[in-house]
Amino acid sequence: MPITRTLTRTLTAVAASAALLLGGQAAAQETVLFAGWSGEEQASKPIIEWMISSFNEANPDAQVTWLGWPWGQTQQQLVLRHRSGQAPDVAQLDMSWLQTFAVMDALVDLNEVFGREFLEERIDPGLLALGEVDGRQLAIPWTTASIGMLANEEVLRQAGVESLPTTVEEFEAALEAIRANVPGVVPYGFSTKGNSMISADFQAWLWTFGGEIFDADGNVVVDSPATVATLEWLSDLMDRGLLARDVDRFDARTIYARHGVGFYDDAIMARSIARSNSGDEDFDEHVVALPRPVVEVGADPRSVAWGHHLVLFKQADAVTADDAAARFLHHLVFDDEVPLAYFEDQGLLPVTRSALAAEVVREDEYATGWAAFTATSRRNETVHWPNAAQMTDVIGEEVQAVLLGQKEPARAAADMARRLGALADEVR
Amino acid sequence: MASGARAGHVDDVAPRPVGRRGGLRRAESRFGFLLAVPALIAFGVIILYPLLRALYMSLHRDSLLVPTPVFIGLQNFQRIFQDPLALRVWLASVTFVALTTLVAFVLGLTWALLLNQRFRGQGALRALSLMPWVLPSTVTGFLWVWMFNGQYGVINAFLTRFGILDEPITWMATSGGAMGAVIIARAWTSLPWFMALFLAGVQTLSQEQVEAARVDGAGNLAVLWHVTLPHLSSTMVIAIILGSIGNLQLFDIIYVMTGGGPVRATTVLSIEVYNQAFRTWNSGMASAIGVLWLLTIAVPVIYYLRLLLGRNVERG
């Protein structure tokens, strides 16, 4: 009996001590879950780990941990985690996903956390607008640029292309030169599979040919001569062997790094990806970014705005600027050392005025050239719609049907308009 | 009289032992039921509740983004039946299931008959034959999609090197090519399962029966046609039914290899449910398609259960 009593007392004491210890530690150290995909990718994993560890070292009262998935699964995982009450504190979002989380009312208005004045003082309002929904600052751009065009300098040299094409006519001539002079190389790695990639690449050319999918009032206007002209042009490139079937952005990146593609569309970090894929530290000299060729000389080069956002998910208690999650977001975006290290490592443009003015950014021709044609970029036309994923599928399927010879361009344009109209009506 | 008395006595006391036996049976029955309770609870939680929940959701406009389902009756089903793309999905499913089951069936049977022969290294080859079954299906999907890649795939490299093709074919870029690729990949993974089933069946074939046929002058083909295949007939039926059910449920290999493309050519029911639930967040529509998917699977399942119950009755 006394043994039992002693044992009970000992266990109680141990339990009480453990509770005090754990409780004390919990009070002393605030945990932050940071979710996204960049920390999962081989090329960017080390720099993301450094961002987290540098914050943890400087903030002993906070502990940031990483939770990641491949890019293609991140949106779904974040939606499911939010629905099950397990949303992360800070998350990385693709620019095109913002509307989805806005509809869910899942995100903190960052104006209320940092103050509007603070944000506008540090970030150009044009960039801030990318993270705004209905007057609320639901996201802060982490990096922003566009899906631009890249050429492979080595392939162009072998093809005898001496200057970068500026018009569609010159572009076609360059593609023909590659096909004729560099056997086995894909002249243009336009995405011909993967609806989201086809949709983005198609929209940039559609705007180049003077068309658009929706007008300013949200009416579907894609059944137009410009759309038919764009589809006919792409179909013609395919028939002439200037595009390749069964190629998406990821395939194009792989073969670009092996000098297997002349031109392709990608985001600004294409240079670091090519360096990583090729295993050649000097591969940068072959990577050339160029404004998308235009139909008429003097027209603005078109590209689809692209970027990664950072957001704070709503938690049980309101988030303030003093909370570890807000401080971590501040660390990632506003402590210049961090976005500049990210830029040097991955080539991703920072967003704050001070970081953009840094010498390391201004002296990088590749980055400044990219920033120049990003100025005339537009947001993907589907991102404003809550059913953007369905619309993306429709655009991708109709373009792909033309490229595979299953539909005539005029029929595809009409079908695209009909199907998009039905989707738009569903959510009006 | 005595016997009558005895009989009467027996009649009088007869209910008691019967009652005791009945009591024992009831007790056994109760005990059996108690033993089944954990399984029943698991069934209720894991299968029955999600099934009923899916039926409930199929009658609602429900989205993962907005947690307020609205009852809309049969509108989801109405939309499915009015959508021409839905018929394409169903046809793609039937094509995939029929061809995959057929290919795996024929190859599995052939392989089983080969492995039933005695030769050196038979054991090692049997073990190696299980390899496709052991590999995770996503790994299998990636392996085959790389092999079929139009730019750097080994299949094109092989065919062009030996002069069979003048230039590479972009297999995955055409509807037929993509469907063919996923069928081959799935048939490859399920081949060991079919093979094991047929090998087990063929090993129960009496050698005396085969020898008797040979004495009657039957050649190899005649033995196969008149002895071996009839012996395997019930195994074949089960293999086809279970194989079809498995192929109708398949998601991962197709998703990894084609994502349902190109232009929905390989969008089978499982892919469409996933797209509706996790790309367009429309869980109501995903549930409605899931219900129709369940009804499609129910056809071979019912046939299989009838077969199984029929056998049990015969044995009983």
Image (tube, rainbow, N blue to C red):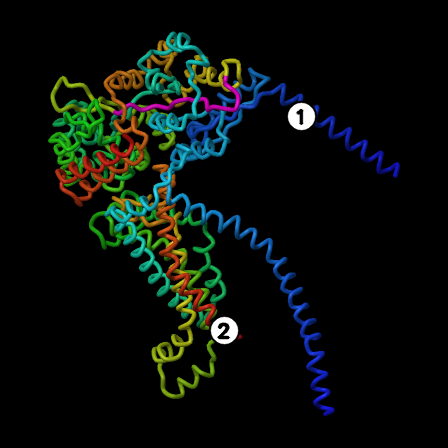
Residue on which the image places disc 2: B313
* Image spot of residue A289 (x, y percent): 26, 23
A316 within the magenta span? yes
Q: What amino acid is at disc 1? A: Leu
What residue sits 62% from the left and 62% below the top? B32
Of helix, strand and loop, which one carries label 1?
Answer: helix
Residue on which the image places disc 1: A22
Label 2 neighbour load within 10 Å: few <14, some 14-19, many 20+: few
| Viewer can see residue A403 | yes
* Image spot of residue A261 (x, y percent): 25, 34
Q: As displayed, is residue B30 above or below residue A78?
A: below
Q: Which residues are magenta?
A: A304-319
What residue sits 49% from the left and 73% below the top? B313
Q: Mark 2 belongs to which subunit?
A: B
Q: Quadrant of residue A148?
A: top left
Q: As displayed, is residue A257 above or below residue A299?
A: below
| Viewer can see residue A162 | no
Q: Quadrant of residue A264?
A: top left
Q: Quadrant of residue A190?
A: top left
Q: Mark 1 belongs to which subunit?
A: A
Q: What amino acid is at disc 2? A: Val
* Image spot of residue B260 (x, y percent): 31, 45
What residue sits 47% from the left and 63% below the top? B126
**Separation of residues labelled 1 and 2 (CA atoms):** 63 Å
Left or right: A122, with A176 as reference point: right
Of labels 1 and 2, the one closer to you: 2
Label 1 neighbour load within 10 Å: few <14, some 14-19, many 20+: few
Q: Quadrant of the C terminus of chain A?
A: top left
